[in-house]
Image (cartoon, grey):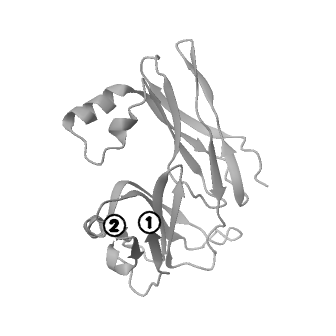
Amino acid sequence: MIRRLLTYAWCFCCATAWAQTSILEIANPAPRAGEEVEIIITVKKESLEAIEIKEKKSTEDFAALRKNKIAFGNLKISQVLPDTGKVKIGPFRFSIADRVYETNSLTLRVYPKLPDTAREGLWIRQLDYNGQSYLIIEQRSESEDAKFAQLNRDKMEASGLNIVTSTSKSESQFLDKKTTAGATPVSYRISTYKFKRTSAFKGKVKIDKSLFLDFPPNVSMDELWIKG
């Protein structure tokens, strides 16, 4: 069972306080056991979903979205998730200028951590979460000047998959937690891609090395099929 999350770091910046919509979103919808979880908080004047879901937005659309956002920030769960399984985060309640706002809640599935014996490798997962589709790519390398693989946006779009947003995070990992003194860390990077299927999508797409830039040599990956 997931233990109760007791500590967190809060970073919040806001403007005037007359919003009607307060939303929690997740940077990585499929965290692994032992990882930090980053939550994105947005407070809006009103729901502009009709504009937000447009694949192509005009200058006026972007201006409307900017004006509609009056508060945003990140919430980092600093106590790591110790177990696999499901965990609920939120709702959170806060006040701005004597007005109280309450967010939605998120329910996440926590996945097993990567094996400590794997100092080199690339792992890819696809999942649907809250009506959105994601590709999550993780890579470890022992090289000090490692190049990390990234999806080729042009080839993805030609296959009928449009990358809407992407985020990346890099860090050094000590895989043997008992003997960090003198141990050599590995370089680790996780990239999260939110994507949509376009009219060019033909029912299924195989995600393999051909859809990547800077794919590491001598590293294999399991084929992944994205289906409609």
Q: Which mark is residue 228?
A: 1
Determine crowd level at label 2: few under 14, some 14-19, many 20+ residues with C-alpha closer than 10 A: some
Q: Which mark is residue 28?
A: none
Q: Give me the C-alpha separation between circle 2 and circle 1.
A: 8 Å
Amino acid tagged 2: Phe
Horizontal and vertical percent position of residue 140: 49, 73
Residue at image x 71%, y 58%? 85
Give SS at disc 1: loop
Give SS at disc 2: loop
- Where residue 93 sits, quadrant-wise, is top right
Horizontal and vertical percent position of residue 214: 32, 75
Horizontal and vertical percent position of residue 221: 47, 81
* Circles 2, 1 touching at the beta carbon (< 8 Å): yes
**Count of numbered circles on the image:** 2
Quadrant of the rendering where the N terminus is positioned: bottom right
Res 214 visible: no
Q: Is residue 184 above or below residue 42?
A: below
- Where residue 148 sits, quadrant-wise, is bottom left
Residue annotated with mark 2: 201
Residue at image x 46%, y 16%? 18
Res 93 visible: yes
- Where residue 209 sits, quadrant-wise, is bottom left
Left or right side of 91 for 4:
right
Q: In this view, which residue lies farthest toward the right?
A: 1
Residue at image x 26%, y 31%? 63
